[in-house]
């Protein structure tokens, strides 16, 4: 098995709420996987457990054979797993450039300034370089959030709703930039997404969550067309995609 | 044995006084998320006003027993005047700012009020011993204690119960608890958060002033009495958990009793023990004894 | 390597103060020495504030630094100012290294109150200690500097000159730090600790190191103050002293390492005037000034000095 990331029997309860009820998942190197599901289905909880923000009640998560449960977010980042956030986690009072300088500095980049300029170019953030992160439009905040996650050259990139809150006509632009930065770098990408157009366009595999369980897992067309997924995730009366 | 009883009694007396101060402070923080340093000034204002009113009462030839009423009136007066003045006049314009900034604002108010007190009352001490001396003493073993201390304990217990009843059993109280829990949702539900803030701050101010008024007969009321009080009240509130009335009571009891033992057996360490207790509690329970759970951020 | 504006400013101010050490009247030297001492403490506070923490207990290290310097003379019979400064700085740094292990876990109000608690613990110990002069404190008299014996009114000037050099040396170091990765990282922690951890850096480590640095600076300032005044007392550790440092920090703002010294000088000047003419409204003036700064000039007086506004 060449699974780079594998979860076994993950269990997580918050009082009466079951966020994970025996989740088993394995991800191949360099695959692009989308995690879908209604709010509260357990997608973000899964990401939070992988990155060490939450500890599962039971079960294990292995990255390249190494056990992740019990490690802190910092240790997991050092191993090569980075993430972006549903609500972009930026340094509000620092400029876009400074945000990236911080990330590069932490990642011990050799030439921090040059590396930062390269990232600004790759993500089209050059125009905003001097602006305070707290004053940016949402799409740019999302891009910066992802750009910072990529600075450490992770092996696994987790994106939590990368296009949520972004204007409809900007979503594809953002995903194109992100996927462009990821392509050819050997990175495994997991992204949580609610927009099925984005899902079908960029994912090679889709995992559907409901009530803490995985109810479907496979090729996008198959999963998005499955009965259970239509009932619990997408909605029964989906109009045709345009 | 009577020695031990004496030390414990002293501790309970001190705890009662601490509780009155801490209750108002913790209520204000719980509802408004403001750690009110000006609480010390309100305490001092309560003491000075009590001394003035009781002094005038006696000077007018009235019966000494009426001075107790004067203490209560002083507390009410200071609370009803200073509470709205500070809340509407200053704090209202600062809501939404960072907690530390609000702390600094109340610190600034405290500095201003310290000098206002000096301007109004001068720098000599004021004494009003009648309420303290009137009821006489009682015995614990071989030691004599003022009956006044029993009054203090009784007031503290009564106040605590009254506050608890008001918070947990009345409609208005439940609205306050809702605001403590979540300001935004409360406002969205139609609770007049503005009015809740005003009421809370006024009640808190009254409690501080009551603490001062009740202390006035036992001390020489002079500039600066509010300074020490603030830090002590903070220690108690933080120990008990910010925003918890029960925590304030328990914290007051812990600090009061420990301090009493220190005073009796190791006087040099009196101040030390109080803050030591606070440090220990925070180490074990970083948010205080009774603290609210927090929702996740991401 | 060309020096930036701040470095030039530091150099100029140092030269001016050194000239003052040599030629200014005694009362001015005293005022400036005290302002400098407090400026160093506030420099440490500003360091912490950049990291997002407000300490209400720098009086702990200020008092410790002052007493360490004084005790060296009192008990150790050592009258050398250089050793006193070292003792004050290292003593404070040592305590900060221990307490920092605990305090670096706290934030916001709890950090403020816990730091206040520890300073009050020292205050309590000092006040109750008759061996240390209790509330009166005791005097110290330094007779030499780094082995060089001094006498006849020159000592204070020499000590002041030394503190000028040392103070601006550390200020320069802190300035270099602000413009480096560590400075940006500290500011990042202030803005979003969670993200810093997720990027792979240890927030605790940065906070701890900044805390120890701030403690050391406060200790150094304490030693300077003790030498300038010739007397130490428990008031140095009282919470109102810590409050004063916070006030001076807010007055100046956190924008530049020169700001703490500027606002400390203004503060001491105003205090001298107020004590002379209107001692009963000094606190009120402080309070009103603080409110005014918070409401109208939240970045402190330094925002008036800066030409262009920029996110800090």
Image (cartoon, rainbow, N blue to C red):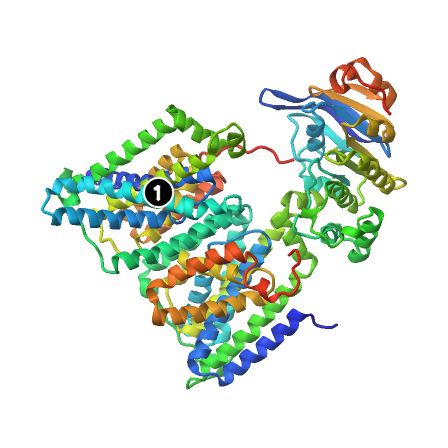
Residue C86 x/y as whole percent: 52, 69
Instruction: Estimate how packed mark 1 is, as few (under 14), some (14 to 19) or many (20 or more) residues with alpha carbons within 10 Å.
Output: many
For residue C32, side relative to residue A236 (left or right): left
For residue C281, side relative to residue A159 (left or right): left
Image height of B184 relative to C205, above or below: above
The quadrant of the picture occupied by the C terminus of chain A is: top right
Quarter of the image where one finds residue B144: top left
The residue lying furthest to the right in this view is A184
Residue B253 x/y as whole percent: 33, 37
Query: Which chain hosts label 1?
Result: B
Residue B8 x/y as whole percent: 26, 38
Q: Regarding mark 1 in the picture, which secondary structure is present there?
A: helix
Residue beneath label 1, please? B205
The residue lying furthest to the top in this view is A227
Q: Residue at x 63, y 66 (%)?
A: C173
- Of C96 and B233, the residue lying toward us: B233
- Of B239 and B62, the residue lying toward us: B62
- Of B87 and B27, the residue lying toward us: B87
Residue B147 x/y as whole percent: 17, 39
Q: Residue at x 58, y 64 (%)?
A: C304
For residue A17, side relative to residue A159 (left or right): left
Quarter of the image where one finds residue B27: top left
């Amino acid at each position: 098995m060449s699974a780079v990331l594998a979860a076994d029997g993950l269990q997580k309860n918050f009082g009466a709420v079951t966020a994970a009820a025996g989740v088993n998942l394995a991800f191949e190197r360099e695959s692009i996987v989308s995690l879908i599901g209604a709010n509260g289905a357990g997608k973000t909880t899964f990401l939070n457990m992988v990155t060490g923000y939450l500890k599962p009640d039971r079960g294990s998560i292995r990255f390249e054979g190494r056990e992740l449960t019990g490690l802190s977010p910092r240790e997991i980042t050092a191993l090569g797993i980075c993430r972006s956030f549903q609500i972009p986690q930026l340094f509000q009072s620092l400029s876009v450039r400074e945000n990236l300088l911080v990330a590069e500095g932490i990642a011990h980049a050799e030439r921090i300034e040059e590396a930062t300029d390269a990232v600004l170019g790759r993500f089209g953030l050059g125009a905003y370089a001097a602006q305070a992160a707290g004053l940016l439009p949402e799409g740019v905040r999302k891009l910066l959030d992802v750009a910072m996650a990529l600075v450490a050259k992770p092996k696994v990139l987790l994106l939590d709703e990368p296009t949520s809150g972004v204007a409809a006509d900007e979503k594809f632009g953002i995903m194109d930039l992100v996927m462009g930065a990821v392509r050819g770098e050997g990175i495994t990408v997991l992204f949580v997404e609610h927009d099925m157009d984005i899902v079908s366009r960029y994912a090679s595999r889709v995992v559907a969550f409901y009530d803490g369980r995985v109810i479907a897992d496979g090729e996008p067309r198959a999963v998005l067309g499955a009965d259970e997924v239509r009932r619990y995730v997408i909605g029964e009366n989906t109009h045709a995609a345009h | 044995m009577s020695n031990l009883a004496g030390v414990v009694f002293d501790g309970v007396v001190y705890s009662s006084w601490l509780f009155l101060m801490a209750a108002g402070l913790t209520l204000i923080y719980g509802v408004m998320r403001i750690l009110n340093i000006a609480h010390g000034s309100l305490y001092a204002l309560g003491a000075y006003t009590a001394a003035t009113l009781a002094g005038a009462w006696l000077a007018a030839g009235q019966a000494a027993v009426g001075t107790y009423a004067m203490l209560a009136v002083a507390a009410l007066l200071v609370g009803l005047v200073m509470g709205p003045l500070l809340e509407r006049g200053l704090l209202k314009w600062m809501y939404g700012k960072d907690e530390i900034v609000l702390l600094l604002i109340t610190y600034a108010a405290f500095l201003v009020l310290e000098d206002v007190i000096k301007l109004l009352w001068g720098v000599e001490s004021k004494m009003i011993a009648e309420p303290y001396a009137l009821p006489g003493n009682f015995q614990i073993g071989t030691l004599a204690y003022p009956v006044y201390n029993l009054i203090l304990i009784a007031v503290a217990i009564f106040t605590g119960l009254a506050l608890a009843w008001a918070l947990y059993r009345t409609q208005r109280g439940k609205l306050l608890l809702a605001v403590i829990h979540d300001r935004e949702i409360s406002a969205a539900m139609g609770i007049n958060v503005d009015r809740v803030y005003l009421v809370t701050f006024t009640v808190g101010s009254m409690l501080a002033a009551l603490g001062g008024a009740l202390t006035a007969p036992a001390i020489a009321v002079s500039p600066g009495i509010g300074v020490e009080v603030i830090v002590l009240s903070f220690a108690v509130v933080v120990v008990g958990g910010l925003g918890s009335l029960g925590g304030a009571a328990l914290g007051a009891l812990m600090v009061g009793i420990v301090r009493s033992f220190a005073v009796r057996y190791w006087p040099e360490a009196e101040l030390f023990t109080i803050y030591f207790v606070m440090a220990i509690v925070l180490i074990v329970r970083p948010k205080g004894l009774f603290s609210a759970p927090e929702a996740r951020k991401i | 390597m060309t020096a930036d504006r701040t470095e030039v400013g530091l150099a100029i101010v140092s030269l001016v103060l050194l000239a003052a050490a040599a030629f200014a009247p005694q009362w001015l030297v005293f005022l400036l020495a005290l302002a400098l001492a407090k400026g160093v403490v506030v420099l440490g506070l500003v360091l912490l504030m950049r990291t997002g923490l407000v300490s209400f207990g720098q009086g702990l290290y200020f008092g410790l630094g002052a007493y360490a310097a004084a005790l060296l003379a009192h008990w150790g019979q050592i009258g050398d100012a250089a050793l006193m400064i070292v003792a004050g700085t290292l003593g404070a740094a040592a305590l900060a290294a221990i307490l920092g292990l605990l305090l670096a876990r706290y934030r916001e109000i709890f950090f403020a109150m816990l730091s206040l608690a520890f300073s009050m613990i020292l205050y309590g110990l000092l006040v109750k200690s008759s061996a240390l002069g209790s509330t009166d404190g005791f005097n110290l008299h330094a007779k030499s500097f780094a082995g060089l014996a001094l006498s006849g009114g020159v000592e204070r000037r020499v000590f002041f000159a030394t503190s000028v050099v040392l103070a601006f040396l550390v200020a320069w170091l802190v300035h270099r730090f602000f413009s480096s990765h560590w400075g940006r990282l500290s500011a990042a922690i202030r803005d979003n600790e969670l993200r810093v951890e997720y990027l792979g850096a240890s927030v605790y480590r940065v906070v701890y190191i900044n805390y120890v640095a701030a403690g050391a600076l406060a200790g150094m300032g304490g030693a300077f103050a003790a030498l300038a005044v010739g007397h130490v007392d428990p008031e140095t550790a009282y919470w109102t002293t810590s409050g004063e440092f916070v006030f001076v920090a807010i007055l100046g703002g956190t924008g530049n390492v020169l700001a703490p010294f500027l606002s400390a000088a203004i503060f001491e000047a105003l205090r001298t005037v107020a004590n002379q003419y209107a001692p009963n409204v000094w606190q009120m003036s402080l309070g009103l000034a603080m409110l005014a700064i918070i409401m109208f000039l939240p970045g402190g007086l330094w925002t008036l000095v800066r030409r262009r506004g920029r996110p800090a």
